[in-house]
Image: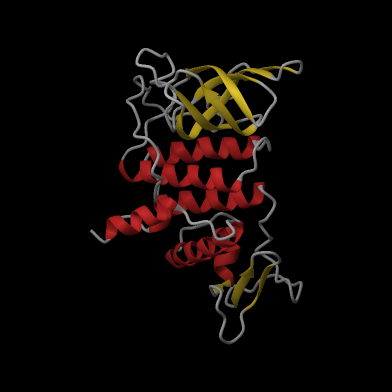
Amino acid sequence: MPSHDDLIDDAPEQAAPPPAKRTRASGSASANASSRTSARDGRVIGQPGFVLHSYPYKETSLIIDMFTRDHGRVGVVAKGAKRPFSKLRGVLQTFQPLSVSWSGKSELRTLIDAEWVGGMLPLERTALLCGFYLNELLVKLLARDDRHPALFDHYVSTLNQLAHGEPAQIVLRKFERALLKETGVAADLSRCTTTRSRVEVGGDYVVDPERGAREAGAGEVWPVVLGKTLLDMEREDYTDPATQAQSKQLMRFLLAHHLGGQPLNTRQILIDLMQL
C-alpha cells in the first residue's frame, strides 16, 4: 500500500482509451502536434494537452481544466460533451495525450475540438492514484494561463515513468520539486541561508519555505533533515532510503505551506482507504 503522498483525487472514472502502443513515449509526447494561434479571436488549434479535472456544466456540457504545453493551465467549456453520441465523450479523459483546439479570450474558453494522440501506456492501480495526485497539485498550484513548457514535458515524463512501474516515491519527489521550481518558490537546498556556506553532509537542517535551508536548532517544529538529504534532492538522487523518507516529510511540509492551508483530497482519500 503506497503512502499518502502517492495518491489520488476524486476525478471521474477513466473510460477505456483506444489501444495504445506498448512503447515508452518521449518526454514531449505531444510536442510534434501542430499548434496555431489566431490573435484576432484567441483561437488556438492543435495544442498538446491533458485533462486535469472536469465537472458537469448545465445538462450536457463539461467545464474542464486543461494542462497545455504552450498556454499552461486553461479552463474550457466542452459544449455537448455529455451527450451519448458526442465525439468528445470518450476522448476527454485524464492521462491521455490530446491535441486540443479552443477559441475565446475570457478566463473560460470554448473547446472546439479534442483528438486522442496516443503513444502512452494507461495508468493502472497505484500509478493511477499517483496520477490523480499530480493533477490535484497542478490545479491548486498553477495559475491560469501561465505557460510552463518544461513542466509540461516533465509531467509527460512522470506519467510515463509511473506507467512503466518506476518507484512512485522517487518519481513523485522529483515532480514535486520540479513543480516548486517552475512556480518560483523552490530555494537552493545546497546552501545554508544563515552562514552562506555549502550545506554539510552530516549536519541537521530545516528548510524555511520562503528562504531556504538553515541549521536546525533545539525544539524545531519544522521537519529536521540531514544535509545529505538536501544535497541528494538538489542532484535528484533518491537511492538512499533515508533520503526517500526525509524528502517525503520535507516536501509534504513545503507543499502544505505553498498550498496555503488547502487540503489535498488525494491524501485524505488514501488515509480513509487505509482505515477500512
Vertical placement of residue 25 versus 255, above or below? above
Question: How many numbered callouts?
Answer: 0
Residue 129 image offset from top left, x and y in percent: 37, 45
Q: Residue at x 48, y 67 (%)?
A: 246
Q: Is residue 47 left or right of residue 88?
A: right
Residue 29 image offset from top left, x and y in percent: 52, 27
Question: Where on the picture, by quarter, is residue 111?
Answer: top right
Question: Where on the picture, by quarter, is residue 33?
Answer: top right
Residue nearest the viewer, comparing 115 with 58: 58
> Does any portion of residue 26 appear in the rendered image?
no
Residue nearest the viewer, comparing 214 with 135: 135
Q: Is residue 24 left or right of residue 275?
A: right
* Direction bottom: furthest residue: 218
Classify the position of the N terminus by image quarter: bottom left
Classify the position of the C terminus by image quarter: bottom left
> Does any portion of residue 254 appear in the rendered image?
yes
Vertical placement of residue 176 versus 105, above or below? below
Residue 216 image offset from top left, x and y in percent: 61, 80
Q: Residue at x 44, y 22 (%)?
A: 118
Residue 241 image offset from top left, x and y in percent: 42, 64
What scheme was used to colour the molecule? Answer: secondary structure
Residue nearest the viewer, comparing 163 with 186: 186
